[in-house]
Image: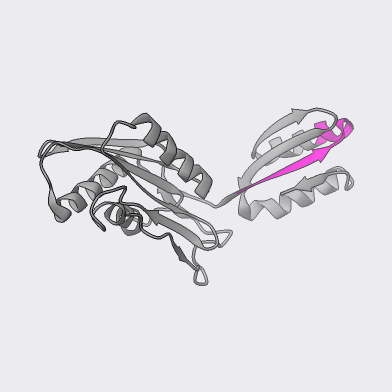
Amino acid sequence: MTEPRETHKHPPGQPGDVNETYRTVAGRGEARFEVRGSVFLGHVALAESVEEAESFVAAIEAEYADATHNVPAYRVRADPLREYGDDDGEPGGSAGKPALNVLVQRDLENVVAVVTRYYGGTNLGVGGLARSYARAVKEAVDDAGVVARRPHERFSLTVAYDDSGTVRAVLESAAVEFDASYEAAVTFDVRLPRAEAAALRDRLRSATSGRVSFDD
C-alpha cells in the first residue's frame, strides 16, 4: 500500500532561508542484518531533488530486483519540503513510515533511503517490521555519517569566446564548482551556495560589461 506524499510549508526562519545550514548524510551508507531469517539491507544517499531521490530508488530496485521488498523514503529540500515513504507491499504503516520517521527524527534533509528485505519464512508482525525498517535506515545513516551543509543552487551562463577566459578566472577566484562547454559559444554550468549566487552574477556582469547571458 502506497503512503501519500506529504508536503509542509516552511515557517519563517526554517528550510528555504538562503543562509541556513541543514543536516544531511555525508555520502552513501549501507547496513545489513538478519531478523528471524529475513535479511535487511539499508541504503542511504544524498539527493538534492525529488528526481535524484527517485532515480536512486529506481537504481536500488533494479539492483535488488529479486528482493521481496524495496521500501523507499526520502526528504528533499524544496518549497515546500517533500517527504515520501512507501510500504512496497508490506502491511500498512509497517515499513515506509518507520523508515521516513528516522529521517525526520534525525532532522535530515536532501537524503533518500531504501530498505531491501529478503523474506526468511517467518512473519515478523507490524511491530517487528517497523523496528527492522527503522533500524536499517538508522544504521545506514550512521555508516554514511551526518554533516551540515548550506543550500546550493545551479545556474548556467553563456558568453562569447573572447569573454570565456575572464569568466573562468572569476569562477576560479570564487572557488565554485563549474563545468565548461566550448561550442559556438562557451557555456558554464555553475554550482555554488545560494547565499553567494546574486553577488557572483553581479561580478560576472561587471567583468564582461554585461555580455553574459544567464539561464537558471
Would residue 189 be found to the left or right of residue 206 on screen? left
Placement of 107 over or under 14, stated as above or below: above
Furthest residue to the top? 182
Q: Position of residue 192 (x, y in %)?
A: 62, 45
Can residue 147 be seen from the camera position used here?
no
Q: Is residue 163 magenta?
A: yes
Q: Position of residue 35 (x, y in %)?
A: 13, 40
Q: Is residue 2 or residue 151 the one in the foreground?
A: 2
Placement of 29 over or under 87, stated as above or below: above
Residue depicted at x 43% and y 34%: 59
Q: Is residue 2 magenta?
A: no
Q: Position of residue 72 (x, y in %)?
A: 36, 46
Q: How is the image coloured?
A: one colour
Magenta residues, start to end = 153-166
Residue depicted at x 42% and y 47%: 111
Residue depicted at x 49% and y 71%: 11
Would residue 19 be found to the left or right of residue 35 on screen? right
Would residue 97 be found to the left or right of residue 130 on screen? right
Can residue 182 be seen from the camera position used here?
yes
Would residue 37 be found to the left or right of residue 60 on screen? left
Residue depicted at x 70% and y 35%: 172
Q: Is residue 128 or residue 155 the one in the foreground?
A: 128
Picture quadrant where residue 83 is located: bottom left
Give the position of the N terminus as an image quadrant.
Answer: bottom left
Q: Position of residue 146 (x, y in %)?
A: 37, 46
